[in-house]
Image: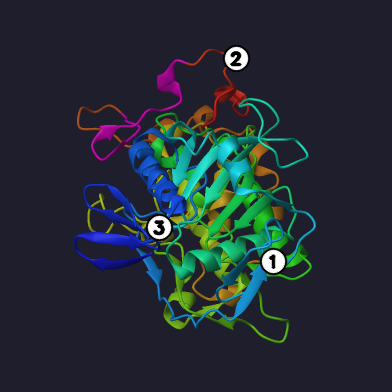
Amino acid sequence: MMATGKDSVKVVGVEKHKNGKVLCKKKNESGTGFWFRIKLMFSCISSRSKVDSSMNATPIIESKTVIEKLEVHSPPSKDVTCPENGSTTPLISGELKYSSKLRIFMFNDLKLATRNFRPESLLGEGGFGCVFKGWIEENGTAPVKPGTGLTVAVKTLNPDGLQGHKEWLAEINFLGNLVHPSLVKLVGYCMEDDQRLLVYEFMPRGSLENHLFRRTLPLPWSVRMKIALGAAKGLAFLHEEAEKPVIYRDFKTSNILLDADYNAKLSDFGLAKDAPDEKKSHVSTRVMGTYGYAAPEYVMTGHLSTKSDVYSFGVVLLEILTGRRAVDKTRPNGEQNLVECAKPHLLDKKRFYRLLDPRLEGHYSIKGAQKATQVAAQCLNRDCKARPKMSEVVEALKALPSLKDFASSSSSFKSMMPVGKNGVRTQGSRNGVPLRSLSSLNLPQGSPYARQSPKPKGKEA
């Protein structure tokens, strides 16, 4: 995604104007494939307001600016024969690595599995394309009746754009060979004629971004720490446990998906990069990612390392703690960049509480919050060598979800709350709108928001 002018911001294959309308590019072709793509694209447009972006494939636009320097790709030099229909399709800037773990789907099967890619099946969309909910056989590739078999998320590749194809390859080559509880499972793919689709496990709770910034009900403290720990485990696996270390390069709240029990899993490996060997400290590459999350040394020099991911984790951990976006243009000047605003308070034991999401109203562990802010400060160190390893972050966070020393039980907590104009201590507001807090919901004694994680629901988040 890169800015192209004051009137619009472009993502690869998708153009978003100020009025919020998304226009999918058309491709001048003849035949039924063309008309199908037109139908699919208009389905994305008409359904955008009805869905959650639970499987976003590209950096979110909204108030974030994306840094990206696109390079000119060389002409196609590699042909790969599709294993399903024998057709030969040129691959651009990379090869498709075979993985026995992945299922190979026929396009018509995925079309039926998603009920003809109808708008009601749309889960989200991005620069990569649209994502649809579908149902397939538990151990096969054939479509089944909705509500039966295995529920999946089917991501369609926009037919335009070299970058989209490259990211499609990266998704398969990384997720096809990486298996971990904190990584979204790639079930399989379709490569038939000019069709490129990916099939993932379905994540019913959607993205962490939606829960932090778009839902009225705040996530409880224990759930936030559980999510932070799960995401940290995912990065630790990529950096230190995978057979060949991987730099994720796009760690942010919209790429952290949640299952029914709020277990965090990393998704979208389109920008992932092989980590350098032990003899090298970094790899040099073009700068790609989302403004506000990218490490400063990477933005300035293009030097990428696993410590770049550690910095991004620090940003996300701050978002989890504060309930604020990494970059929020709706805030006054001087308050728009979360890291810059938070740093003076992170290591101050007397002021760190000012950072915490006011909607929690003290329903957080004092020791846990102190430890979490310390971890965030370490991850956000401008000296990349001074940042901790993700395995060290995992160890630091392990105990936090279960700590019960809630600030609301402390006699000093009320004196820490800000005082409003009427002399009453308030929980804060966002953009002038009072924030809903846990106590304001009049939850029953047995509510999962009182002591434990929310229970799974039947519907997807």
Image location (x, y in percent) of residue 343: 43, 60
Whether residue 435 is in magenta: the answer is: yes
Q: Residue 115: give x, y in percent of width and height.
A: 53, 33
Q: Badge 2: few (under 14), some or many (20 or more) residues near its Cα, within 10 Å?
A: few
Instruction: Give the foreground label among 2 and 3.
Output: 3
Question: What colouring style does the render use?
Answer: rainbow
Indicate the position of residue 195 as horizontal and vertical percent values: 54, 56
The CA span between labels 2 and 3 is 60 Å
CA distance separating discs 1 and 3? 46 Å
Mark earlier in primary sequence (2, 3): 3
Q: Which numbered marker is on residue 30?
A: 3
Residue at x-position 75% and y-position 64%: 98
Work out whether residue 64 can be spotted: yes
Q: Amino acid at mark 2?
A: Gly
Residue at mark 2: 446
* Occupied quadrant, residue 93: bottom right
* Residue holding disc 1: 239
427 sits left or right of 56 in the view: left
Left or right: where 44 falls relative to 98 = left
Residue placed at 67% from the left, 65% from the top?
173
Quarter of the image for the N terminus: give it: bottom left
- Name above or below for residue 428 compared with residue 444: below
Identify the mark nearer the N-term, 1 or 3. Answer: 3
Give the residue furthest to the front. 31
Circle 3 Cα neighbour tier, 10 Å, few/some/many (<14 / 14–19 / ≥20): few
